[in-house]
Amino acid sequence: MAIFQSKGEFTAETDHMPVAPLIGAAVGARANPQMMSLLASIVQYSSEAIFSRTPDGVITSWNPAAERLYGYSAREAIGQPAGLIVPPELAPKLNEFIERIKQGERIEHHETRWLHKDGHIIDVSLTISPIRDGNGRLVAVSVIGHDITEAKRVKEELDRSRQELERSNRELEQFAYIASHDLREPLRMVSGYVGLLDQNYRAELDARASEFMDFALDGVRRMERLITDLMTYSRAGKMEPFKAVDVENLMMEVIAAQVLTIQETGAEITYDPLPRVMGDEPALFNLLNELVANGLKFRGAAPPRIHLRARRDGPVWTFLLSDNGIGIKPKDRQRIFEMFQRGHSQRDYPGSGMGLAICKRIVERHGGSIRVEPTDAAGTTLAFALKSTA
């Protein structure tokens, strides 16, 4: 590499091409040749496409990365107008930037679309800076381009996937709601007539017919519960505007709602001081109510003992609800959060298999996650995270 000085300005040159004319002007006339050589090497071997242009738009330097990005060799680009790689419709914007540069501004990370030599469009992020001589006079403009074509493509694909997922979720929620609502009417008819048969003709039935009647009534009740849970699941996807929610108050409301079951089972429900979080209050009540109901339902021989505590983990609160119930097998710890998945038989623990799926949906709509926390103690500890109000 050779370094030339002419009329107080430095120009760096390699055997390949000029890579940084006017760098000396940018750092002042007192810059030494060694510094100029270092700066020129940085430009020459940079992975960013770097070129310089005069204030009136003529390209004066063009590094190898610019050759790779825009397709023009240095010999083809140097001496040409910068509009060589600018689509005509974007030329006014570039001129606006140059005027701002003349006023002393610097343009950073501006995303735009420029032209390759073969005519295809390149998405680039630009940083445009003034190059001044030792007297502060604007002598050139430096343009650093970073190829973001692939990043933009990936982002657009992700945006499309997200939009498709949101559309699919809306359709699923609408389907679940409509299906559940429309199923209720014929089910009421079946339930009503089966109830009348049971009420008016039970005494006339033999043991086998009575057993069939019991199966029919049980099926109706299970279907009613399933429809109710499907509607709850669909509503869990629709959040009200978030606000500060006092979890301790919610826990008191849950205990009040479960008071009959608590009395029947001799349960004890306790909690540590609990924080305020950001969320949809009715949805969070449903979450806690479902988790506590699970603890009461899946109990062992001893009276249920349920405890809720919280710990601060950065910007979120992690809540841990522990019980002394029958526990969850390690192989079921992921599966039980899916719809209609059960860890125990319908005969032993009746239900739709929707409870924890509803909980998961509520937590995820709050931007959190829920899991079974490994523990050496008997029973189960469920952990879920919610964003703090602070």
Image (cartoon, grey):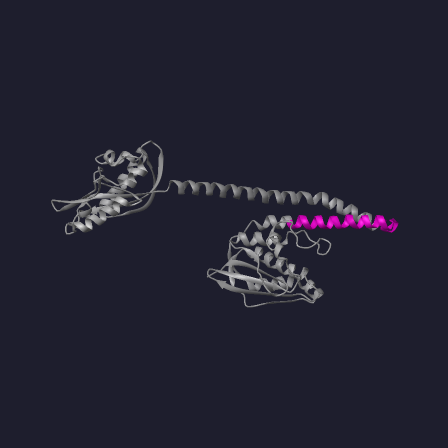
Number of numbered discs on residues = 0
Say if the magenta span includes residue 97: no
Q: Is residue 48 visible?
A: yes
> Which residue is situated farthest in the left direction here?
7
Q: Is residue 103 visible?
A: no
Residue 390 percent coordinates (x, y):
46, 61
Residue 94 percent coordinates (x, y):
28, 39
Q: Is residue 258 left or right of residue 155?
A: right
Judged by its main secondary structure, the magenta piece is helix
Residue 24 percent coordinates (x, y):
18, 47
Q: Is residue 221 left or right of residue 25?
A: right
Q: Is residue 217 left or right of residue 21?
A: right
Q: In this view of the protein, which residue sits in the foreground, 316 or 331?
A: 331
- Give the quadrant of residue 67: top left
Give the extent of the magenta segment.
Answer: 200-229
Residue 221 percent coordinates (x, y):
73, 50
- Give the quadrant of residue 259: bottom right
Residue beneath the point at 35% across and 33% down? 120
Say if the magenta span includes residue 215: yes
Q: In this view of the protein, which residue sits in the foreground, 345 or 93?
A: 345
Q: In this view of the protein, which residue sits in the foreground, 176 or 323?
A: 323
Placement of the N terminus among the 4 image quadrants: top left
